[in-house]
Every structure is written in C-alpha cells, then in structure tokens.
Amino acid sequence: MALQSTTRLQRTRMMTESEFIVLTDRVLESIAAALDAVEADLDWELNDGVLTIDCGSAGKLVVNRHLPNRELWVAARLGGFHFRAEAGAWRDRDGDELGAKLTQLLRAQAGISLTVGLLPAV
C-alpha cells in the first residue's frame, strides 16, 4: 500500500516555481519565434512571463504564466483559457492543446495564419 501511495505522489508532484518559470519561458519564447516567422504586420512584446500580441483594431491577445496554479493563461476576444502541462502537452480543461488553440484564436481575432505547433511541457 505504501508503495502505491508513493508512486501516486510522484506522478502528481507539482513542479517547483523555478522549474515552472524555466519551462514557461521556453514556451513563451517558442510562441514569440512563431510570431516572428509569420509574414504579417504583427507587434508583440514579451516581458516577465507575459506575452502581449497586438492584433490592431481587433485588440490584444495575452498569454501569461500563472505561478500559483502552474498554468498558462490566454486572454482573447473569444474568452479566457487555462492550460496545464499534462502528458507532455499544454492542455485546457476541454483537452485543447495550447499551440492549436493559439492558432485558432489568432486566426479568429486578427486573421493571421500562424502555426505554433506543439509547445514544450516538460
């Protein structure tokens, strides 16, 4: 019984704050690199765990880390979304992957065709 409890705890161990910051920095930098590669007049800013994408007259789309919950949050015109690192991918409660959701949101909000791809979750 003790072995099962220990194994369960190891699987559900929350990453440390430092681990989470390093991981989310890599994710945000990957998104920024995809934004740089797109052939569109798109302004963005990455500052201390917050990526702000200016979609012109369509407003802003924001991706930021939320330390207490170890989540990445996305705020867009279509709503707010929370993503957790699960099984090697960032997924929201509906099972949508972060890169695919950003692709969808940027297309809907700014008419931008962007393929973000699978973002690092480990």
Image: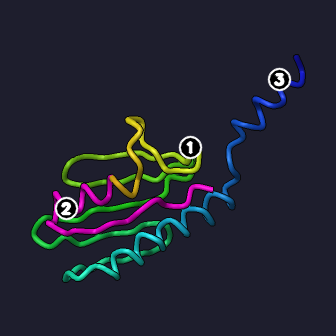
Labelled disc at residue 107: 2
Real-space CA distance between mark 3 and mark 2, rounded to the nearest whole angstrom:
46 Å
Alpha carbons under labels 2 and 1: distance apart:
25 Å
Residue positioned 39% across, 58% down in the render: 99
Q: Residue at x 36, y 77 (%)?
A: 45
Quadrant placement of the N terminus:
top right
**Disc 3 packing (10 Å; few <14; some 14–19; many ≥20):** few
Looking at the image, tell me whether mark 3 or mark 2 is earlier in sequence order: 3
Magenta-drawn segment: 101-122
User: Which dot marks residue 76?
Assistant: none
The x and y percentages for residue 35 are: 33, 76
Q: Indicate yes or no whether the magenta region holds residue 112.
A: yes
In the rendering, at what x and y percent does residue 98 appear?
40, 53
State whether residue 41 is above or below residue 55. Answer: below
Q: Which mark is residue 4?
A: 3
Tell which of 22 and 111 is nearer to you: 111
Q: CA distance from mark 1 to mark 3?
A: 21 Å
Residue drawn at the location 47% of the way across and 68% of the way down? 28
What amino acid is at disc 2?
Arg
- The image position of residue 118, as x and y in percent, is 46, 59
Q: Are marks 2 and 1 in contact (CB under 8 Å)?
A: no
Q: Is residue 122 positioned above or below 96 on the image?
A: below
- The picture places residue 82, in percent across and down from the top left corner, at 41, 45
What kind of element bears circle 3? helix
Locate residue 66 relative to residue 117 in the image: left or right: right
Asked if the residue under mark 3 is in contact with the one under mark 1, i.e. CB atoms within 8 Å, the reply is no
Disc 1 target residue: 86
